[in-house]
Amino acid sequence: MPKINKYVDIDTVEREAKKDLIDRHSPFITVEGDAKVGEMLKVNIKMGQEYTHPDDFDHFIEGITLFDGETKLAAASFVPGTLGNEKSHAEVTFNIRPMGKKLNLVAHGYCTKHGIWESTPVEVTVAQ
Amino acid sequence: MPKINKYVDIDTVEREAKKDLIDRHSPFITVEGDAKVGEMLKVNIKMGQEYTHPDDFDHFIEGITLFDGETKLAAASFVPGTLGNEKSHAEVTFNIRPMGKKLNLVAHGYCTKHGIWESTPVEVTVAQ
Amino acid sequence: MPKINKYVDIDTVEREAKKDLIDRHSPFITVEGDAKVGEMLKVNIKMGQEYTHPDDFDHFIEGITLFDGETKLAAASFVPGTLGNEKSHAEVTFNIRPMGKKLNLVAHGYCTKHGIWESTPVEVTVAQ
Amino acid sequence: MPKINKYVDIDTVEREAKKDLIDRHSPFITVEGDAKVGEMLKVNIKMGQEYTHPDDFDHFIEGITLFDGETKLAAASFVPGTLGNEKSHAEVTFNIRPMGKKLNLVAHGYCTKHGIWESTPVEVTVAQ
């Protein structure tokens, strides 16, 4: 408490409403290009892949936090209306510079009605 | 991942170093006075009860977040040096106004070296 | 742009609506007790002294930031509904540990409709 | 207080150290493509154009906030080490959806040693 809701592959979910609930609240991490040690790496996090989330004043995606394992790298916070009060994918792109051999990226998204949601972790091998 | 470390009663822990680790990273919630519906209520959150945490540039308590169940109520973020770079209890007091019958308060603290730590939940009955 | 609205003594303001606008958006800083070097000091920041601010989903006090001169010490962020969606003084108490001879405390409050508001600065002499 | 440092064209500045100070602390806003009403628009904010900023534990870019006029749209906060503790351009890309006729984008960057810095405003005409 609070529950950390984890992503479940929605192909394994039967009810349409549940697919929608899970997908629109889940952060999806995409890394642009290959990771090289000491070079900047763009990491995009998008809330929802197939379903969009409301951007209402009383129900919106308030923040996205990016972790490498236990370590917070960066966080974004949003204001309702930024997405025109229309159903949308909240999204942010951070730049990081990996210095080690591996990244264990994971993101948390926070919905003001449905709490904290955790992405599937993305392991990135960093070329040396 | 990231792990949500939960408070364990340190009387049940044997090793001094582990007592220290757990206590200094755990948020402790104290409610001032009785909760009455519609009236302001002071909620204090203090990191560590018996042990203090470093306030070093590369190792400090960066934030405290207060939840009522799944819902974020308020968050504080700190800057190293605010506590004089000395071992301290990071602390914040929020004011909230309960409108329902019960509060399920729980706090997360974030240490830049040791990740997310969750308090013992505090159930507050709100007088009507 | 964005404008940093500064507090104006409302006794010098004639129109009631303007007194209300200025007062309810202004952070007021109160230091508890005397400041002593190396000792914890409670700093309270309250939005509005005589007038309260809405806590509506589309119009609320979203955050309070405390500075010592140019340096951010701590920040609080709030969620609408935390104050019961009723007109209120948003408020937070931080603990800091002054290490120098003087603090130049100043706070920014942010209203989702009326932007950034700056408190009157509070100079605190720190007993050595 | 705190001072809102504003960008000054560094071609008008003589001293190299001052060019560096101004440039590396200033947020630069770039909008990707044309803005169309109701369509998502990528807004990139990069700290420094020609000069990079340290990413040291006691001296780093802690946050970037994007405004449309007086209204906060989104904010990013960073952790030192995310940029490998090397001199870098802190950077973030937000997605927004303009609904009106014009955006008046402006960004604040916050350096833990040198305070708040404001970008040159970028006026964006939104095609209807």
Image (spheres, coloured by chain):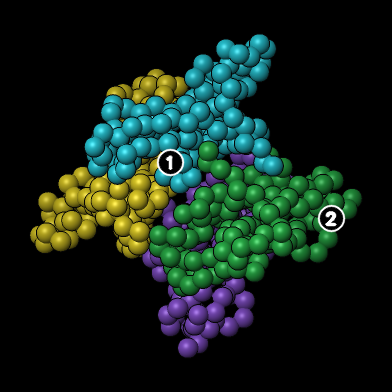
Chain colours: A green, B cyan, C yellow, D purple
Question: In this view of the protein, which residue sits in the foreground, D48 or C114?
Answer: C114
- The amino acid at mark 1 is Asp
Q: Position of residue D47 (x, y in %)?
A: 61, 60
Residue name at image x 73 percent, y 50 percent: A121
Q: Is residue C32 above or below residue C74?
A: above
Question: In this view of the protein, which residue sits in the foreground, D85 or B25?
Answer: B25
Q: Chain of mark 2?
A: A
Q: Is residue C73 above or below residue B7?
A: below
Residue name at image x 49 percent, y 82 percent: D37
- The amino acid at mark 2 is Lys
Q: Is residue D42 in view from this perspective?
A: yes
* Residue picked out by circle 1: B68
Which label sits in the foreground, 1 or 2?
A: 1
Q: Position of residue D121 (x, y in %)?
A: 48, 71
Which label was assigned to residue B123? none
Is C3 situated left or right of C87 in this image?
Answer: right
Mark 1 and mark 2 in contact? Answer it, CB < 8 Å: no
